Image (cartoon, rainbow, N blue to C red):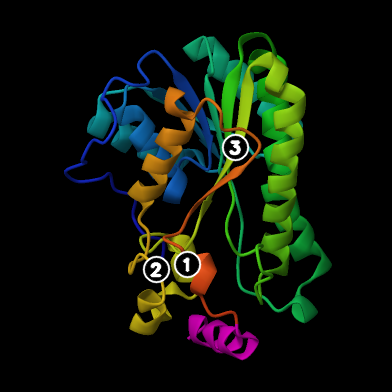
Amino acid sequence: MAIPEKCIENYKYTFQKELLRGKVAFVTGGASGICFTIAEVLMRHGCDTVIVSRRMDKLKQSADLLMKATGRRCVPIQMDVRKPEQIIKAVDEALAQMGRIDILINGAAGNFLAPAASLSFNAFKTVMEIDCHGTFNVSKVVYDKFFKDHGGMIVNITATLQMRGTALQTHAGSAKAAIEAMTRHLAVEWGPDKVRVMCVAPGPIGDTEGMNRLGGKHLTQDFINAIPCQRLGTRQDIGDTVMYVVSDAAQLLTGTTVIADGGSHLTRSNNFQERMTLLKNSRL
């Protein structure tokens, strides 16, 4: 069952509240999960947003929640990141309504646990198309239509599972690794146009549907104790990390990845049999 979206209670400001006033963010996957909270954090700092995904009913519900919590404008637009013609239409609509796009958050993604041996050709293709192709598709359209002439900031939401090779994640790890390579290439090519391109890589984030799908409900205290920071991350942690990356304090950051996982990728177990047990438990 999906976790109902809700805004942060008693949000604590680290950055100035008006830091992003006058700016507009275009957030793929912004109707739910981590990207919903990224949109919220940006809006709490004066940014207006456009949130896009495939389900208009969910988009409208999330946009209403975000506007009530932040007092900022949020425009929901239905779009599939795999379909360039829909992206072109969506970006045109966003520019018509907002007049500008300053920040692009590429967060649309798909994932599930599956051994490579039982991963279908279509399942692998679908994840690559949503994550990797979708990131390029949206980045190119926003670049062509606005960033090329005005500059901008692209933040690609990746992961840490591709860093060592994680069992049951061949599809998602391949997509995230491709996105991080793409980020470096785009940063080099688009930097002269005043476009910064960055990745933010969340580790285990406890308050997400995705974490539950990937076996998070069965994590043990030993797993948490092994994280150097001694806790799972939260959606707000990632929202605040993105805030830093898009702020002027990070002007020299481009073409690289900020890992936001409390050090988990340095210490977590990567035992194949343990991962297979996790897969079994996640299906119970």
**Can you tell which quarter of the image residue 227 is in?**
bottom left
Q: On the image, numbered disc 2 is attached to which residue?
A: 228
**Residue 1 spot, x, y in % from top left:** 41, 66
Residue extent of the magenta highlight: 271-284
Label 2 or label 3, whichever comes before in sequence order? 3
Decide which of 247, 62 is in the foreground and name it: 247
Closer to the observer: label 1 or label 2? Answer: 2
Rendered view: 15 above or below 207 = above
Residue 91, image x, y percentages = 61, 22
- Magenta span: predominant SS is helix
Disc 2 residue type?
Pro
Residue type at mark 3?
Met
Residue in the picture at 19% in, 46% down = 9
Q: Which mark is residue 198?
A: 3
Relative height, residue 111 to residue 242 (above, below): below
**Is residue 214 in view?**
no
Q: Quadrant of residue 172?
A: bottom right
**Badge 1 is on which residue?**
264
Q: Is residue 130 above or below residue 261?
A: above
Q: Position of residue 114 (x, y in %)?
A: 67, 75
**Distance between the alpha carbons at the discs numbered 2 and 3:** 24 Å
Q: Is residue 230 above or below residue 244?
A: below
Is residue 63 shown left or right of residue 162? left
- Residue at 28% x, 44% y: name it: 7
Q: From where the camera sits, is residue 165 visible?
A: yes
User: Callout 1: 10 Å neighbours few (<14), some, many (20+)?
Assistant: many
User: Which residue ends up furthest to the right in the rendered image?
Assistant: 121
Q: Residues within 10 Å of mark 2 (few under 14, many from 20)?
A: some
